[in-house]
Image (cartoon, helix red, strand yellow):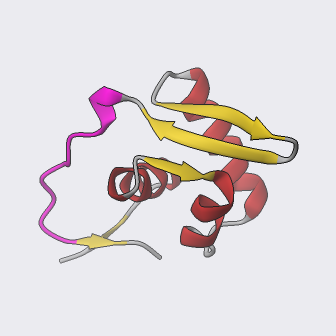
Amino acid sequence: MSRHLTVSEQILEVMRRTPDCRLDDLVLSCKSLPLQVLLSEVSRLSRKNQLQLTLASTGSFTLQLLSENCRPRSVKSLSIE
C-alpha cells in the first residue's frame, strides 16, 4: 500500500538522496509540484532549520540538508506524485 507524501516529505526525500544540491535540481526533481508551493515549503523548511538555503552566486542557490534530516525514514512504500 502506498501513501502520498506531503510537499515537505517529498523535498526531504529528494534532499536525502542528494544532500547538497542546487535549487534548480530540486525544482526538476519535484516537477509535479507547483513552483510557488515548492519555494514556499523550501522557505519554511529553511526557517525551521531542516535545510539550509545559500546564495551561491547571482541567481543561483544551493540547498544543504541539515544533519538530523539525513537519516532515512523506514517507510515500506513511498509514492511521490
Image x and y of residue 25, in percent: 60, 63
Question: Predominant secondary structure in magenta?
Answer: loop
Image x and y of residue 7, in percent: 52, 54
Query: Image quarter for residue 35?
Result: bottom right
Image check: 39 left or right of 58?
left
> Residue at 49% of width from left, 22% of height from top?
49
Q: Is residue 68 above or below residue 62?
A: above
**Count of numbered badges drawn on the protein:** 0
Q: Is residue 21 above or below residue 4?
A: above
Query: Image quarter for residue 45?
Result: top right
Image check: 40 left or right of 26?
right
Residue 11 among those drawn in magenta: no
Image x and y of residue 21, in percent: 53, 52
Kindly give the residue lying farthest to the front in the view shown: 57
Q: Looking at the image, which is closer to me, 28 or 11?
A: 28
Kindly give the residue lying farthest to the right in the view shown: 58
> Residue at 16% of width from left, 59% of height from top?
75
Q: Quadrant of the N terminus?
A: bottom left
> Residue at 54% of width from left, 70% of height from top?
29
Image x and y of residue 62, in percent: 62, 43
> Residue at 58% of width from left, 60% of height from top?
26
**Part of the protein shown in magenta:** 67-77
Q: Looking at the image, which is closer to me, 6 or 65?
A: 65
Q: Is residue 52 above or below residue 61?
A: above
Image check: 51 left or right of 16?
right
